[in-house]
Amino acid sequence: MDNLHGLTQQEYETIKSLIGREPNDIELGIFGVLWSEHCSYKSSKPLLKRFPTEAPYVIQGPGENAGVIEIEDVWVAFKIESHNHPSFIDPVNGAATGVGGIIRDIMSMGARPIALLDSLRFGDIQKSKRITKGVVKGIGYYGNCIGIPTVGGETYFDSTYDKNPLVNAFCIGIMPKGRLYRAKATKEGQLLFLVGSSTGRDGIHGATMASAQFDEKALKKRSNVQIGDPFYGKKLLEVIMYVAENKLAVGIQDLGAGGIAGACFEVAYKSSLGVDINLDEVPLREQDMNAYEILLSESQERMLLVIEKDKLQELINISQKFHLSWCVLGQTIDSDKVDVHFRGEKVASLDYKIVAEGVPSCYIGTQKTFEPSKEQFLPSDISPKDLFMKILSNPNIASKEHIYTQYDFEVGTNTVVGPSSDGAVLRIKWPLRPEVKSDQGIAIKADGNPYYMESDPYEGARWTIAECVRNLSCVGAKTLAFSDCLNFGNPRREDVAIKMDLCVSGMADAMREFEIPVISGNVSLYNETVEDNTITNIMPTPVVVGVGLLEDVHKHMDHRFKKPSSIFLIGNLNQTYTLNGSLVQKILTGTVKGALTKVDIQKEKILADLIINLIKEDVVLSVHDVSMGGLVANLFESLVDSNLGAQISLYVDEDPILFLFSENPTRAVVSVEETLEEQFKELVEKTPLDWMLLGSVVQKQDFSIDCNGRELLRCDLTLAKDIWKNTLKDMF
């Protein structure tokens, strides 16, 4: 057959064997989408089984539209999702619909979305202006218009993402305890009620496109990119919240990848019931659409509700009140098939188990491994001051203010701590009943430094999990669960498969040591470009979002120095410091490589608990973890939003550049008032961790560092802040 609809020849032969006949074009289209990498996880399923997914407070783990955890009387739903390929082809719409899609995932659980977060990767700063500007515009457009704040995120720039930008969107929502919807029916004869926007030709085979490598023809796939409408999305949100609050539905499923086909097969499989649908009923926005187009369209802002017949009229009434399109698409039946009718004919009939379970695994596995170089990188011909100035002007350290100020991060009045901090902090309250509130708070943070994973995939992944937990503790939160997005290149290339295997193992092992589960996530593969016979795969870029709990939201913390005080470094200070995988190595050599120091997860757990206790006891004025850019970047970031300075005096055995610029884990900088120093030291000394007096926060806006009595760095903070704040200015 000439057109395999994104399937391989082997998959086509498998389909014929499983269904016992030649599939028609519509059925092939269904298989093409639902057996795509994006929908089936055919190259990654064995890896995903390594993750820990259970804890006493986990209500829903992986496998649904979002994961759910319990926080006393509140259930919290969250998930991260990728929209990478569409955002390269059409940056504005690709990013906007990525946001819209993840919002609907949270809605489908019965939760009201309260915040967004994004994790972005762009190419070289000079080459990626169009994509960067478009993606940021798309995220801001959808989030701002629908009224959900974008409260945080992370952004990296590197040439590995020139033709494969990564746009990972995260959403979190809350619901009353006990109100949880899943994508399933409970018996035959229940109706399938389609509500939201009308159906057009946009996004057909979007999931298939998102599962393929890019080549010179990529930009011609613009019609595969969905078009979002946040105002319609807002109306749909309120209708779904009304449905959830009034128990009008049995099950809820959003229409994402695969459109109507994807939603119907999902419901059928999870319900162990057949589905019979009639495409003649679907409200259309374009003329002469055929069954293939209607079934596989990925038009946005649509939801499928499973309902009892006696709820139909109330659903029609609320849909009409909000001017939404609707139809009774079909019903559940006592069968093992999804039957599709159009213009009086049955145009498709497939066993839902075959579609859901029959895809041949593409996981190649590998007997080989990746051994990072033991050689340690240490520059010898550059001064600490020159290196500091290079770091400040690097887009990965420079201020992201020009990005996040395009987002409304305070709408909804839940935001306590917003962008640019170690983590965002949110209040827990009900939008429609603000008098119902809690003193508890939720913190969220995304992490995924690709340089660590490129240098040392296994240990770099462990560093990433540790950094996420540490970041949340720095705002006062105990990490409860993760959502992850595994962004990799072509999994059929052995070098990519090896690093993917090691990264997943590193993440899973660290999560187990922390005793923190991952309850939702996404896999994005084939982030590869083949151009002029040159193959470029992205660096391994798994991203993890941690969700944590503050027992008292009023006792949150940030990283900013607030007044003259003493500066301490706390943590595991007797480890072997390294510049492998660091920003300094990348800046000076153009690459990253070499083994990373093994992170002691038990000490990370102790450090997280210590930081939370220091905040709870009001012993510290600020807390900031040491990560990208090392100790120097940490100190500067703590100064940048204050009118203060810092005088640092070090007495260390290590090479000063190694100590100042290494990104080793299990360390944080705190500022402490003089009257509380003894209490601070006592609390640290009760643990196996160390403290070191670094210097002082001073009134004069000056930043100086000396080591063993020799001045290493002195700079005018006004100039340094100007460089840091304006590096990305020209991109917008």
Image: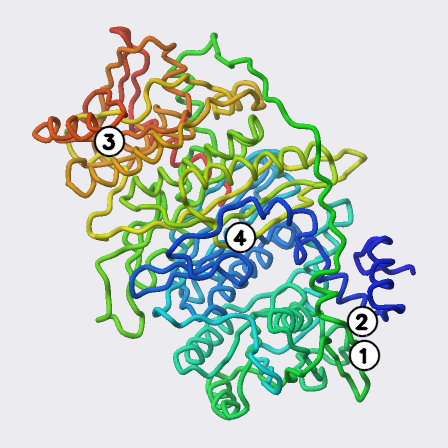
Quick check: 668 left or right of 188? left
Q: Report, in whole angstroms, how far the alpha carbon at label 4 lies from the one at label 1.
A: 34 Å
Q: Are marks 4 and 1 in contact (CB under 8 Å)?
A: no
In the rendering, which numbered label is found on residue 347? 1
Dot 4 or dot 3, earlier in sequence: 4
Please state which of residues 66 and 410 is positioned toward the viewer in this rendering: 66
Which callout, 3 or 1, points to the residue nearer the camera? 1
The amino acid beneath tag 1 is Val
- Determine the image quadrant of residue 304: bottom right
Dot 4 or dot 1, earlier in sequence: 1
Name the spot of residue 50 as percent of width and height, x first.
Answer: 56, 44
- Element carrying mark 1: strand
Residue 551 versus residue 642 in the image, above or below: below
Report the residue marked by disc 3.
670
Report the residue marked by disc 2.
26
The quarter of the rendered structure image containing the N terminus is bottom right
Residue 192 versus residue 497 in the image, above or below: below
Report the residue marked by disc 4.
521
Q: Are marks 1 and 2 in contact (CB under 8 Å)?
A: yes
Q: Report, in whole angstroms, how far the alpha carbon at label 2 lies from the one at label 3.
A: 61 Å
Q: Residues within 10 Å of mark 4 (few under 14, many from 20)?
A: many
Q: Does residue 535 appear in the picture of this structure?
A: yes
- Element carrying mark 4: strand
Q: Are marks 2 and 3 in contact (CB under 8 Å)?
A: no
Dot 4 or dot 2, earlier in sequence: 2
Dot 2 or dot 3, earlier in sequence: 2
Q: Report, in whole angstroms, how far the alpha carbon at label 1 lies from the one at label 2.
A: 7 Å
Q: Report, in whole angstroms, how far the alpha carbon at label 4 lies from the one at label 2.
A: 29 Å
- Element carrying mark 3: strand
Residue at the location (59% across, 54% down)? 83
